Image: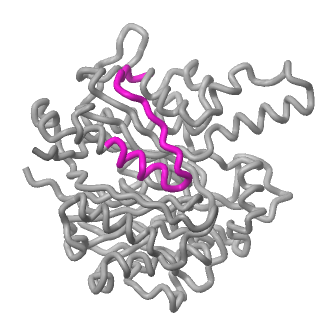
Amino acid sequence: MSVKVVVTGMGAITPIGNSVGEFCEGLKAGRSGIGPITLFDATDFDVTIAGEVKDFDPTRWMDKRDSRKMARFTQFAVAAAHDALADAGLLREPDGEGRRLVSCAPERIGVVIGNGIGGFDVVSESMKKLFDSGPRRMLPLTVPMMIPNEAAGNVSMLYGTKGPAYTQITACAAGTDALGQALDLIRCGRMDAAIAGGVEATIVPFAVGGFQMLKALSTKRCGEPQKASRPFDADRDGFVIGEGAGILVIESEEHAKKRGARIIAEFAGYGSSADAHHITAPDPSGEGGALAISRALADSGLRPQDIQYYNAHGTSTEINDPTETRMIKLAFGAHARALKVSSTKSMTGHCIAGAGGIEALAAILAIREGFCPPTINLDNPDPECDLDYVPHKAQAMEITAAASGSLGFGGHNGVAVFKKYVG
């Protein structure tokens, strides 16, 4: 008997809001979270803009002593996981040490979080101390703070989960792939519930400089940052780096019903593939990504025409956007012309591994709230990008099924499908 998996909690730390409510309102308003870089002095860089998370105080979600042992990406993951668990009704009142542990059997709850780069803020600080003053001045916790698995590890420790705590590292597809791995853990009966999604916080000189040298980042609109991320537009010139976390609590329908949980949506399916093509560029035919979409649809039991909204990877790069358009056409066939497609990266920037989790949230919110998030800045559509990308303004629409796709360096493709829950 197949196991139905449902979403019962959501948490978001993003450039357009540090809660699911703020994030949702930002999507509906078409608000840009792109601005000048403030996390470091970017004066000498060609790229001076990013989608930074604003007004983030980790002590709102965790003890100050704990937060000081975490890189920024781990703080984001812990904060978003807290809100997702609270939303799901899975947190107890604080214990004697001030920890809010999960309220269900901890050995039956897993953690799967996608991350691409880890604690580059910690790496940058420790490398500077190493070169300036020698190894004895490095941060004592450099290694445990910088490694990518520390997000999942800290979520498990702080909330007391004792199921598997996995880290998915498939570049920009990691958040979506983490959701898919968590889905499989529950379906096969290994876990009753999972905390899953994606996180990234890499707006630091080393990462921005590296992407700048790849010629991947937008440089033409640093003077008007809110217009810089323009997926599917003929005048796009690269992506805008962002940061943040999107975390879901998912669980078997049986487990959710047994504890009287409010069910937000059904996590209906997941598909993945590899392009086997190029280390940074997607296969221009779109065949690899189309395969991931088709697998996700087959896994969900849905037909292409059953999907009303597709949250695209939509990076605003020269190669991605027409390739993804071909990918969507291959997978959805004639229905591609009727499908609403948008890139919320036009508002948040590209949050790397955090994108899959954040954009899954956008797809679920589209179902729950009845709207299609817009692709802002789509002023001059690329002739090769000729689908309905919901330009400029959100559109009210009843949505019963939506999908979200992510593509990553190395040719990784992941797609998640969500449905309106019917009990």
- Is residue 171 located in the magenta-colored stretch of the structure? yes
Instruction: Say how many tags the image has.
Output: 0
Q: Is residue 219 above or below residue 183?
A: below
Q: Quadrant of residue 50?
A: bottom right
Q: Position of residue 297 (x, y in %)?
A: 26, 65
Quadrant that contains the N terminus: top left
Q: Is residue 357 among the parts visible in the rendering?
A: no
Side of 414 where 142 appears, left or right: right
**Colour scheme of the picture:** one colour
Q: Which residue is pictured at 54% across the width and 77% down the height?
A: 284
Q: Position of residue 230 (x, y in %)?
A: 56, 75
Q: Depth check: give the residue in front, 164 or 61.
A: 164
Q: Residue furthest left?
A: 423
**Highlighted magenta segment, given as a residue range:** 158-182
Q: Is residue 84 above or below residue 17?
A: above
Q: Residue furthest front?
A: 276
Q: Residue furthest top?
A: 96
Q: Which residue is pictured at 45% across the width and 21% down the height?
A: 157
- Is residue 129 located in the magenta-colored stretch of the structure? no
Q: Quadrant of residue 71?
A: top right
Q: Is residue 153 among the parts visible in the rendering?
A: yes
Q: Which residue is pictured at 30% across the width and 61% down the height?
A: 296
Side of 234 where 389 appears, left or right: left
Q: Position of residue 395 (x, y in %)?
A: 31, 75
Q: Which residue is pictured at 14% across the width and 46% down the height?
A: 2
Q: Position of residue 171 (x, y in %)?
A: 56, 52
